[in-house]
Image (cartoon, rainbow, N blue to C red):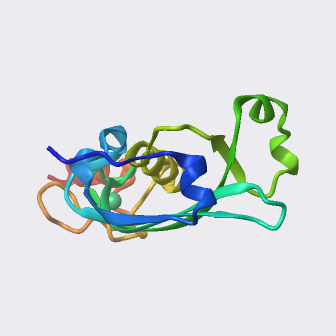
Amino acid sequence: MYARPLIDSLDFARNGRRISGEVPITELSRLQDVLDNPQGVLSYTVHGGLDKRGDCFLDVEVAGRCQLRCQRCLQGLDYPVQLHARLMLRDQTSLDALDDEEDEFDSILAEAQLDVLSLLEEEILLSLPIAPKHELGACQAADGKNLLGEESSPFAVLAKLKRN
Ligand SMILES: [Zn+2]
């Protein structure tokens, strides 16, 4: 079982601490719905600090590759994950009062036992395309044949059927 790292988020930020590691994608359960398969490993770094105003933040970096599902051919699509995000740590009261529109960075609740992997999951989910697709003409049919743009239209398929 992979050990899920927990950090005391405010303490982590005030002391400028850093945690990094690699996580198998199989451990990121919330990603499984959007992935074609759970192959791969992502590397991550979370670095805490204080900004000029003395507010605590976490800088999150994730890099690696995952397998999304192409929305055109439903086959696996190799997708590079490369994300950098700054998350401000706030208590519940200031989160409730916050106007998202005006804030330069996203904010999260400053938990005393912040689950680093669920933080990464959340950020990765936000960074993924909603409808990933292979480049035009690069889709693969289930039998391995290249599906060209014209052929994949229902009319082209119908015309083909009639000819046979
Ligand atoms: Zn495709």
- Where 72 falls versus 59 (above or below)? above
Question: Is residue 129 shown left or right of residue 67?
Answer: right
Query: Looking at the rendering, in which quadrant would you find the N terminus?
Result: top left
Residue drawn at x 19%, y 57% as measured from the top left: 39
- Where 61 falls versus 113 (above or below)? below
Q: Quadrant of ligand 1?
A: bottom left
Q: Position of residue 73 (x, y in %)?
A: 31, 53
Query: In the rendered picture of this protein, how many numbered marks are placed on residues?
Result: 0
Question: Is residue 68 shown left or right of residue 16?
Answer: left
Q: Position of residue 162 (x, y in %)?
A: 23, 48
- Where 16 falls versus 11 (above or below)? below
Q: Is residue 37 visible?
A: no
Question: Is residue 130 shown left or right of residue 150?
Answer: right
- Where 96 falls versus 152 (above or below)? above
Q: Position of residue 9 (x, y in %)?
A: 55, 48
Q: Is residue 70 visible?
A: yes
The one of 13 and 99 positioned closer to us in this rendering: 13
Residue drawn at x 17%, y 66% as measured from the top left: 145
Residue drawn at x 51%, y 64% as measured from the top left: 17
